């Protein structure tokens, strides 16, 4: 299958990249174009990789940005390696942390990696993905190798990095082993003799500085770094994070995933189209144009985005069903067709039922939702948390939580 023209490949592969420096952006794009031309003449694909230190098995959309870029390389016929950081995780990447990161054992990393890779295949083509583990070469490095790696860098280069600098100025310890991480990641590129490494913007030093410098030190041509922008969470501002509660899990049910995407502020839509979807640069430009010109309602564009994202992680049919449910619940103000059921017991209060159904996680949250008129029974606001639960029906908390409350079946004999 013939590859797309070089300029089209460059435009797609640089989509969503963010270096924080215009000259560096141009340099990487030009290097990518030249490498594509050369490898095409050689009749070989680009060797591309991204490394993942699976410190958790719960992935959200923010984790998938680099995977989407790898899939674009795959679709263009290039060789993609999904590198599991069984070696680097034993140090812990300090790049985006202002405190010491806990060290994982190789066994913990391998355990997380099995789930991690399985979820990654929701995006990557499993038949075209090479899985490797960097402990294969990192744990075999000898003292002489480490000295050679370390001699390419200065202490100043590390201390000037923002995360280390902040800790240094606060008097918090910066451990020597934390500086190894950039060396180890850089050596990954050497060990695999890669053409391209994909990573997030927090990996700029590790990829552009460490990786390229070490490849040159070992007589290799330096790799091109594709540095991806950071995906904001559902608040549209702060980086997506499970700890902040602004994340969209990739294992979320279709309806929940669709609803979370629809909760995004309009200002975040374009970055999601660029980083999360399968849209090409021309398709993203078309979305940008209709939003700028006001020829489509932002809500309709966001529904298009939600359909696309749910289709990626589930199916087109699941996306269509999630959209119909969303329309019923939020546009027609109707309850979803399917929902959990709860058997009401005599004498239970509104507060009792809210807690027992799991619609809230605490009594304080239950009271707050009642006070804010966020609790409804068959569409009617319930205003007293201590009142006896009025009757059976559809209990709703907030915009997306529903339970069908039924009578407890009577016992016989």
Image: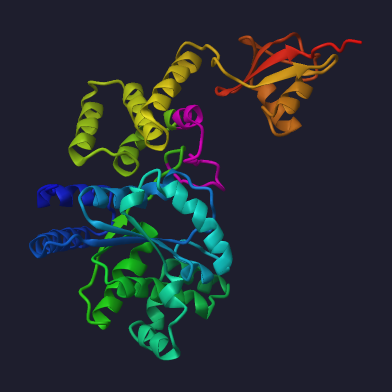
The foreground one among 268 and 151 is 151
Residue 203 % position (x, y): 37, 63
Is 344 included in the stretch rendered in magenta?
Answer: no
Q: Residue at x 69, y 31 (%)?
A: 365
Magenta span: 237-260
- Dominant SS in magenta: loop
Query: Where does the image place residue 150, in percent across and percent down from the top left?
Result: 39, 84
Q: Nearer the viewer, residue 120 or 199?
A: 120
As drawn, 413 above or below 237: above
Where residue 165 appears, as percent x and y from the top left, is 46, 71
Number of marks present in the image shown: 0
Judge by depth and name the residue closer to the eye, 56 or 160.
56
The answer to which quarter of the image holds residue 151 is bottom left
Quadrant for the C terminus in the image: top right
Q: Position of residue 273 (x, y in %)?
A: 31, 37
Q: Residue at x 26, y 82 (%)?
A: 218
Q: Is residue 67 visible?
A: yes
Tell me: residue 295, above or below residue 61: above
Q: Residue furthest left?
A: 41
Note whether 14 is above or below 266 in the view shown: below
Left/right placement of residue 135 relative to residue 271 reads right
Residue 104 visible, this orientation: no
């Amino acid at each position: 299958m013939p590859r797309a023209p070089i300029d089209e490949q460059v435009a797609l592969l640089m989509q969503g990249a963010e270096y924080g420096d215009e000259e560096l952006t141009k340099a990487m794009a030009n290097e990518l174009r030249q490498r594509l031309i050369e490898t095409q003449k050689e009749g070989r694909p680009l060797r591309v990789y991204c490394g993942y230190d699976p410190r958790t098995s719960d992935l959200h959309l923010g984790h998938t940005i680099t995977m989407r870029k790898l899939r674009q390389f795959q679709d263009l016929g290039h060789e993609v390696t999904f590198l599991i950081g069984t070696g680097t995780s034993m140090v812990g990447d300090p790049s985006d942390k202002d405190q010491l990161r806990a060290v994982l054992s190789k066994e913990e990393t391998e355990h997380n990696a099995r789930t991690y890779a399985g979820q990654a295949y929701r995006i990557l083509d499993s038949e075209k993905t090479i899985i490797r583990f960097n402990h294969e070469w990192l744990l075999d490095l000898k003292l002489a190798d480490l000295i050679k790696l370390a001699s390419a860098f200065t202490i100043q280069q590390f201390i000037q990095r923002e995360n280390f600098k902040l800790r240094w100025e606060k008097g918090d310890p910066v451990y020597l082993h934390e500086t190894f991480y950039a060396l180890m990641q850089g050596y990954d590129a050497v060990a695999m003799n890669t053409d391209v490494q994909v990573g997030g913007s927090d990996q700029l030093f590790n990829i552009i500085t460490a990786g390229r410098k070490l490849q040159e030190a070992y007589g290799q041509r330096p790799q091109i770094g594709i540095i991806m922008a950071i995906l904001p969470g559902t608040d549209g501002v702060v980086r997506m994070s499970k700890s902040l509660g602004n994340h969209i899990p990739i294992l979320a049910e279709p309806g929940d995933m669709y609803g979370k995407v629809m909760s995004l502020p309009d200002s975040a839509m374009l970055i999601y189209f660029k980083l999360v979807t399968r849209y090409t640069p021309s398709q993203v430009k078309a979305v940008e144009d209709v939003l700028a010109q006001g020829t489509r309602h932002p809500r309709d564009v966001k529904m298009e985005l939600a359909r696309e994202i749910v289709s990626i992680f589930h199916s087109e049919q699941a996306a269509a069903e999630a959209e119909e449910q969303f329309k019923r619940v939020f546009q027609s103000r109707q309850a979803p067709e399917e929902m959990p059921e709860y058997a009401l017991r005599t004498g239970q209060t509104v507060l009792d039922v809210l807690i027992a159904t799991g619609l809230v996680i605490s009594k304080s949250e239950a009271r707050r939702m009642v006070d804010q008129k966020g609790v409804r029974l068959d569409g009617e606001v319930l205003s007293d948390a201590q009142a006896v639960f009025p009757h059976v029906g559809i209990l709703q908390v907030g915009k997306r939580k529903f339970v069908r409350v039924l009578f407890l079946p009577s016992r016989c004999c």
